[in-house]
Amino acid sequence: MSQDGFSAGRIDTSRAHPARIYDYLLGGKDNYEVDQQAGDALAAVAPEVRIGVRANRAFMRRAVRLVVGSGVRQILDIGTGLPTSPNVHEIAQEVAPDVRVAYVDNDPIVSAHADALLSGSGVNSIVLGDLRDPQAVVDHPDVRRVIDFDEPVAVLLVAILHFLTDAEKPGQVVATLRDALPAGSFLVLSHTTGDFADRSDAQAVYSKATATMNLRSRAEIERFFDGFELVEPGLAQVPFWRPDGPPPPGSDEIGFYGGVARKSG
Ligand SMILES: C[S@@+](CC[C@H](N)C(=O)[O-])C[C@H]1O[C@@H](n2cnc3c(N)ncnc32)[C@H](O)[C@@H]1O
């Protein structure tokens, strides 16, 4: 469904939503009391979470600049989140104005903010879609309007895959997306982990939210890149992935891995 089918009436304020918790942690205003309570509970058990979400966002910006600088002109951003300046299309179109971006999220509140995501002169679209049905995402007419799967595409799965349980087969989900992509395409992925600190209490906060948090180890996350070649430095904690300045204090604690990989022929 395109943004045309949305109304604010479908936005549920009784349960915390990942997009709105994340917006709250980033200092945004598009969140409700229930999301603020969840965000505060997260910060209480994982004090690094606020610098972690900022570092994740900075990773996304560096990764987008890298893939666009490598020549890619189409981005499929699944798990877009609420608009946070600069948004993916703004970062990409600063490097190359002809980049096209298709945004996909399963939370209607994201589409309700379509104006910010569709701003500027580029050809972009926003689609209500679910990563758990990746073929439907790839086949969606509003995705196809913007993305030509015969040309290289950068697929962004930034801070989304951890919302899929093992039973939802995240590996197969990524493989379905990979198989839809031609050689020269990129996967940009970040994912939460408990490798640097025990974060089971943080997972518990999400048990009452609309999606669970599934922390994964380095080895589990690296498997999502099967069929791709990781670019240097491989999978890294997000502040240490091609940093463009000194990592923020506390970076060693950040429970987010990030990586960028290319599909070869
Ligand atoms: C933590 S935010 C990340 C936003 C952005 N990618 C970033 O890293 O700054 C995760 C987003 O993924 C979306 N999401 C979670 N599960 C999803 C699913 N199964 N399909 C599509 N979107 C999903 C949430 O609604 C939320 O907007």
Image: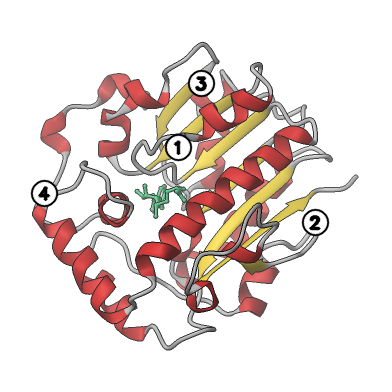
Q: Name which residue lies at 64% across and 50% down.
A: 188
Dot 1 beta carbon under 8 Å from ligand 1 = yes
Q: Which residue is mark 1?
A: 104
Q: Quadrant of residue 128?
A: top left
- 178 left or right of 263 in image: left
Mark 1 or mark 3: whose residue is earlier in sequence: 1
Rounded to the nearest whole Å, what is the CA distance between mark 1 and mark 3? 11 Å
Residue 231 in view here = yes
Residue 160 in view here = no
Q: Which residue is mark 2?
A: 231
Rounded to the nearest whole Å, what is the CA distance between mark 4 and mark 2? 40 Å
Q: Nearer the viewer, mark 4 or mark 2?
A: 2
Q: Name which residue lies at 64% across and 17% down.
A: 97
Report crowding for label 3: few under 14, some 14 to 19, many 20 or more residues within 10 A (C-alpha). Answer: many
CB of mark 3 within 8 Å of CB of mark 4?
A: no
Rounded to the nearest whole Å, what is the CA distance between mark 1 and mark 2? 25 Å
- 3 left or right of 60 in image: left
